[in-house]
Amino acid sequence: MKNAKANYILTITCPDVAGLVAEVSSLLAKNGAFILEANHHNELTSGRAFLRFAFVDQTEGHSADGWRAHYQPLIARYQADLKIYDISQPMKVMIAVSKFGHCLQDLIHRWKAGILPVEICGVVSNHEDMRSFVEWAGLPFHHLPITKDTKPQQEQQIRDLFKSYDAELLILARYMQILSAEMCQDFDGKAINIHHSFLPSFKGARPYSQAHAKGVKIIGATAHYVTTNLDEGPIIEQAVERVDHSVSVEEFVTIGRETETVALTRAVRWHGERRVLLDGPRTVIFK
Ligand SMILES: Nc1nc2c(c(=O)[nH]1)N[C@@H](CN(C=O)c1ccc(C(=O)N[C@@H](CCC(=O)O)C(=O)O)cc1)CN2
């Protein structure tokens, strides 16, 4: 099938057994699927299997639930965590930002250029700094100020907007507020943060100053899923650059911004293409 474009993604995680890949792929073929991409990983430490198939429904007669129905027996037999995604439409995302716009601008630039496989629906911020850029880009901007006392209400505003956009991913593109445990639960696996250090080093605020004080020779950035434990969520992507004694902390910040945009854009692309599977505190990514 030439120039075919997948319209479904199937992902499975379960204890790995002989014949699993054959069984999953033959069920697809038997029901009219044309497989365009097939990935399998066996995690040695846990014996768990991670599978991803991108396929075309040649019958055009299925919905995601229809495909899922074919797999109910397999799900039961293997206690599998199986997901089917209809990818005929790009994933809807909402971006949160504070004052620094370099990651936001990079994402919007790539989206407008058609090279980011998501649909940006809107931007929320606890500051006004990015309003003019976002509205110039033709996107809704929501200023949601926050204080210690108004945090629950402000976070509810974020939930309400996310729901109103039918969004599936919240991108913290240098959003400098710590999400509450309730928010982390509500956005489990659906919120990606960019931390401006090569984690696990230099968690928390002012990581570039921490790194400069340590005299590191490499700096970087880490895109990770957001969890209650600050900067400890499963890592999706990291990017690094070399520095040396002659590089000032201000230059660390400038050099670091490039690594932040690179790591976050890749993480959003891979998550948007359903290429990221969670393996407890780690990720399996089929690039
Ligand atoms: N629950 C989580 N929330 C957030 C995470 C996370 O990993 N889990 N990452 C941060 C981003 N971040 C570092 O990458 C970060 C942001 C903010 C702070 C911080 O100390 N903020 C202060 C307020 C600062 C201010 O008002 O300017 C605070 O919230 O009290 C540390 C790290 C995004 N959220």
Image (cartoon, rainbow, N blue to C red):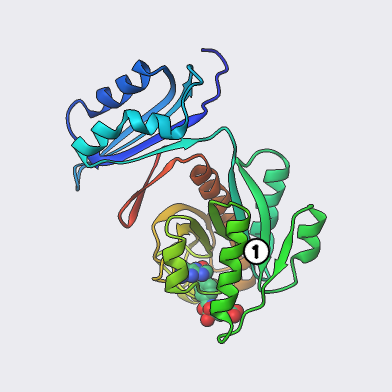
Residue at point 24%, 32% (across, down): 73
Residue 94 lies, in percent from the top left, at 61, 56
Ligand 1 contact, mark 1 (Cβ < 8 Å): no
In which quadrant will I find the C terminus? top left
Q: Is residue 75 left or right of residue 287?
A: left
Q: Quadrant of residue 3?
A: top right
Instruction: Read off the residue under disc 1.
Output: 254
| Amino acid type for the residue under numbered disc 1 | Thr
Left or right: 171 in relation to 182: right
- The location of residue 63, given as percent across then percent down, is 47, 30
SS at mark 1 in the image: helix
Residue 85 visible in the snapshot:
yes
Q: Residue furthest bottom?
A: 149
- Residue 259, picture quadrant: bottom right
Q: Nearer the viewer, residue 152 or 133?
A: 152
Q: Residues within 10 Å of mark 1 (few under 14, many from 20)?
A: few
Q: Is residue 43 left or right of residue 120?
A: left
Q: Nearer the viewer, residue 102 or 186?
A: 186
